Image: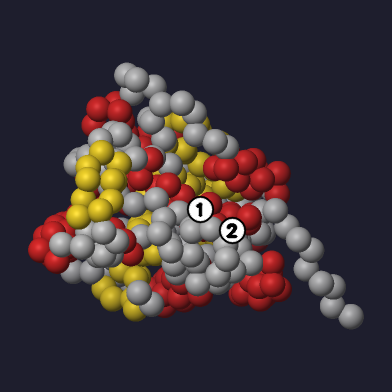
């Protein structure tokens, strides 16, 4: 008889998911397997193709025999044609390292709707809670086969770096860091004056990741300019997925009367009349312009993009993303274009 899945603190949804859906979530997680599009560095025997040469099944190259080479790898047909002993070299299978670059700045605490798969009576889900759920799900999928996960956490600057390690304990430590309360804001912090600087997170990620890795950049991309260039440099070396988190109220302001709103990062407050149709139209126009500029910058960085709204069900979106990457893996490298996955539809960026 099949065992009932046990409650797991590092399962997707965590404290934000619905207990009734745990069984379905566990079954869906078993179907997920992240597809790596670039060859990565690694240390241990694993599931991923690497740049290293060693024992494996895929022939990588031929070279002249050198003293000490395994004679079992001599290619006798090639050696006979070239009149010189040659040995086969194989692409070795190694483990993968995955990094989560996590933007935990003040704007990530915003949320105006509940998750589709949550209890209607549950509290609203913020972008930060969605980031926690995404990180828990992907970390579990990746560590299931002995791969390692690490993270760089950004709040009012770089807050912590977790070197990549394997195992359940690493996932639990990562989630504990994510759920820790935010420290008191420093008066002299750059964020207090200029808001989020996503470029600092990306540049720090470039500095602490010496090996080619799978990289997930989780952010709402509400940031000071200058992040597109380091994101592009990150994508040139690593297999990068930019996970753009947003809330529907950021795109269209609901009519709620007079509201006092506060910038979560700078503390600036404004009194808004959301009943005014003209004001809501101007707000929508600015949001549309911001969306267009953001998409253009992400396309220029040449990274795959997964869009997640605070009201979206996470696991079906993840399954679509995994299927898209599996399809793209079958294409020759020159034909691969950055992909945009949002609203349940995947299209190629140009």
Q: Quadrant of residue 327?
A: bottom left
Q: Is residue 120 left or right of residue 5?
A: left
CB of mark 2 within 8 Å of CB of mark 1?
yes
Q: Residue furthest front?
A: 258
Residue 75, horizontal then vertical, whole percent? 54, 66
* Above or below: residue 89 compared with residue 264: below
Mark 2 sits on what residue?
A: 16
Helix, strand or loop at mark 1:
helix
- Quarter of the rendering occupied by the N terminus: bottom right
Residue at the spot x=46%, y=26% of the render? 184
Check residue 129 in the rendering and tell me which mark sits there, or answer none. Answer: 1
Q: Residue furthest top?
A: 188
- Is residue 266 among the parts visible in the rendering? yes
Q: Quadrant of residue 92?
A: bottom right
- Quarter of the rendering occupied by the C terminus: bottom left
Looking at this view, is 272 or 340 the one in front? 272
Q: Residue furthest right?
A: 1
Q: Is residue 111 left or right of residue 289?
A: right
Looking at this view, is 284 or 279 the one in front? 279
Residue at the spot x=41%, y=35% of the render? 155
Residue 262, horizontal then vertical, whole percent? 30, 41
Residue 195, horizontal then vertical, whole percent? 27, 35
* Above or below: residue 1 compared with residue 52: below
Q: Is residue 36 left or right of residue 7?
A: left
Helix, strand or loop at mark 2:
helix
């Amino acid at each position: 008889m099949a065992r009932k899945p046990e409650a797991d603190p590092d399962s997707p949804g965590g404290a934000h998911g619905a207990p009734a859906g745990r069984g379905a979530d566990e079954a869906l997680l078993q179907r997920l397997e992240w597809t790596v599009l670039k060859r990565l560095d690694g240390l241990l025997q694993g599931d991923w193709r690497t740049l290293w040469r060693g024992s494996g099944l895929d022939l990588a190259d031929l070279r002249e025999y050198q003293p000490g080479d395994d004679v079992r790898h001599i290619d006798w047909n090639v050696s006979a044609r070239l009149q010189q002993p040659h040995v086969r070299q194989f692409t070795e299978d190694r483990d993968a390292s995955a990094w989560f670059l996590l933007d935990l700045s003040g704007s990530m605490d915003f949320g105006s709707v509940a998750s589709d798969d949550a209890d209607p009576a549950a509290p609203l889900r913020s972008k930060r809670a969605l980031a926690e759920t995404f990180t828990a799900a992907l970390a579990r999928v990746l560590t299931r086969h002995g791969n390692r996960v690490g993270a760089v956490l950004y709040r009012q600057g770089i807050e912590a770096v977790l070197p990549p390690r394997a195992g359940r304990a690493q996932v639990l430590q990562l989630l504990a860091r994510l759920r820790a309360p935010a420290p008191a804001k420093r008066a002299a912090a750059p964020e207090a004056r200029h808001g989020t600087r996503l470029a600092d997170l990306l540049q720090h990620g470039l500095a602490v990741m010496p090996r080619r890795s799978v990289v997930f950049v989780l952010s709402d991309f509400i940031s000071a300019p200058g992040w597109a260039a380091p994101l592009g440099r990150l994508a040139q070396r690593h297999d990068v997925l930019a996970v753009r988190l947003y809330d529907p109220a950021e795109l269209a302001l609901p009519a709620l009367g007079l509201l006092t709103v506060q910038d979560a990062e700078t503390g600036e407050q404004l009194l808004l009349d959301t009943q005014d149709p003209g004001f809501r139209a101007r707000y929508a126009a600015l949001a549309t312009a911001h969306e267009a500029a953001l998409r253009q910058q992400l396309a220029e960085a040449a990274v795959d993009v997964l869009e997640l709204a605070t009201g979206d069900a996470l696991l079906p979106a993840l399954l679509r993303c995994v299927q898209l990457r599996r399809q793209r893996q079958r294409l020759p490298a020159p034909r691969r274009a950055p992909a945009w996955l949002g609203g349940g539809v995947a299209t190629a960026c140009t």
